[in-house]
Image (cartoon, helix red, strand yellow):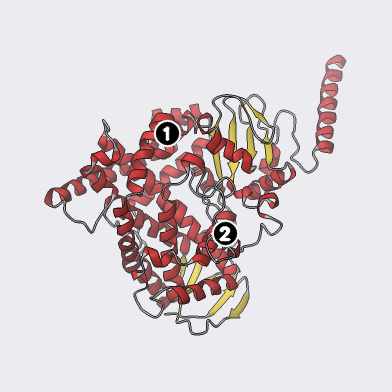
Amino acid sequence: MEILTEVILAIVAIIFLHSLRCFLLSSGKPWNWPLVGTLPMAFLHFHRIYDKITECLQAGNGVFLFKGVWFTGTDRLITTNPANVHRIMSANFSNYPKGPESKRIFDVFGDMLFNSDHDEWKCHRKITHSFLNDQRLHNYTPKINQHILEKGLIPVLEHVSKQGLEVDLQDVFERLMLDATCMMLTGYDPGSLRCGFEEVAFSRAMDDASYTIFLRHILPERFWKLQKWLGIGQEKIMTSACTTLDNIAHNYVEMKQEQLRISKDNEQEFDALRCFLTEDEAIGSTKHPYSVMRDTVVGLMFAGRDTTGAALTWLFWLLSQNPLAESKIREEMEAKLSWVDATDCWSCDTGELSKLVYLHGAICESLRLYPPVPFQIRTTVQPDMLPSGHRVNSNSKIVLSSYAMGRMKSIWGEDCLEFKPERWVSEKGGMRIEPSNKFLAFSSGPRICPGKELAFIRMKAVVAAILHYYNVQVLPRRSLEVDLEDVFQRLLLDVTCMMLTGSDQEIHEGSLSRTIDDASLTRSFGSYKSG
């Protein structure tokens, strides 16, 4: 018995001394505990995990090895090193796929672009790019913007401002982007953004699917697969959500087929389903045209709703904290847009919106500080040596932290935490372009977001319309936190990071009074006419 006690005490002493050594050598880095690795750090800082990881990356010169529980295969190499990002996303792209785990977890998206690798990915990339790069879509985009603003956003904000109501702008932007993306993909407006804010089946199913994906990242794969096989728990809800998404996508396809039977010659409209059903040569041959249409509609609906909705929410919060930047955007609109004295602000075209360089910089700065995709995960196929000097084995998990990347002094300078749209404006007044391995908001390399330019145009149209008519007052009682659940829901899909409690705001028509964090201020915009 005494021998056993001595052995136990010896083991405890060894663990203690090892832990003490790790602590003394950590130099501000997380303490690597025996058995559980750096997991205690993650739990201790769960409420601010993004910022804690950023601190770890700062201390580790852009590289941090997250150690999970021993023998569980949960170690992750996290990096913000631009050279590493270039190696992973471009130079040695084929060695860093998303991996089969992505397709199992995100089965709701089928085989579409976000969920595939290698030859299958190339096929779906060709399909998606051929549609998004079609000039007819770019010609139709201003009409989509006009419709969603005229029929959705402006009437809702007008109702809110006249009634003196609070509104969750995050919910407004998600509904707005759902309508816009649905029109782009199917040609139909689901009308989710209306004054009644009624529940939309498509959105509900998307939210249910996202929450299930979140749980699949936490639970052991065998557990959630057993739930799925038994048809119980959250997997039962997931099955119902997938059925709803399938039915809605099928209905849209049938409606489009009927519309095309009546007339194919409407040159004023262009959408993904019209492209798929009438121009197979443009998208390449496929044995399963319906599956391609279904997966594309569902996948791009998720991406279009969540990423742009999140980006707009963060932008307006940042503008509320930086009134001078908002004032400069208004001044730029007055100087460069032809409709500032008119009532139909949604009539501006893509060319006019492209003139808004400072607004473009404000959007980029918001995306830098609060990227809709805070992390991307890749899995190594073959062992590799990263430019930072770190060797990765096959089947290693690499995490690219775009959130931390935007806060690295080594990348963006000492003022990296400041919101400075001027950062994106060149000395000659044009747009400053940063390399994608430094600005990862739209991903990088062959997987760079194919809808990047369309997203910018849509966001500019929405911001310009709101600032033309209204002043947004962010309520001071609302706390700003990151919704970790929402992040993990979309982690491998590469979509979005949200505000925990939404973004309750008051909308005032023509008001120049704003309350921000209990501080009231009044500004004049000179000759600018605000509604």
Residue 193 point in image, percent of width and height: 36, 62
Image quadrant where residue 241 sits = top left
Please state which amino acid type lies under the numbered disc 2: Glu
Dividing the image into 4 quarters, which one contains the C terminus? bottom left
Q: Is residue 137 visible?
A: yes
Indicate the secondary structure of the residue bearing disc 1: loop
Q: Residue at x 54, y 71 (%)?
A: 326
Dividing the image into 4 quarters, which one contains the N terminus? top right
Please state which amino acid type lies under the numbered disc 1: Ser
- In this rendered view, identify the residue nearer to me: 231 or 266: 266
Indicate the secondary structure of the residue bearing disc 2: helix
- Is the Cβ of the residue at disc 1 closer than 8 Å to that at disc 2? no
Q: Which mark is residue 116?
A: 1
Image quadrant where residue 453 sits = bottom left
Asked if 385 appears above or below 269 in the picture, the reply is above
Q: Residue at x 47, y 63 (%)?
A: 168
Asked if 40 appears above or below 154 in the picture, the reply is above
Q: Residue at x 21, y 56 (%)?
A: 267
- In this rendered view, identify the residue nearer to me: 507 or 464: 464
Residue 265 point in image, percent of width and height: 16, 53
Q: Which mark is residue 453?
A: none
Left or right: 88 in relation to 10: left
Q: Residues within 10 Å of mark 2 (few under 14, many from 20)?
A: many
Asked if 280 appears above or below 176 in the picture, the reply is above
The numbered mark, 1 or 2, whose residue comes first in the sequence reads 1
Residue 341 point in image, percent of width and height: 39, 80
For disc 2, the marked residue is 365
Q: CA distance from mark 1 to mark 2?
A: 30 Å
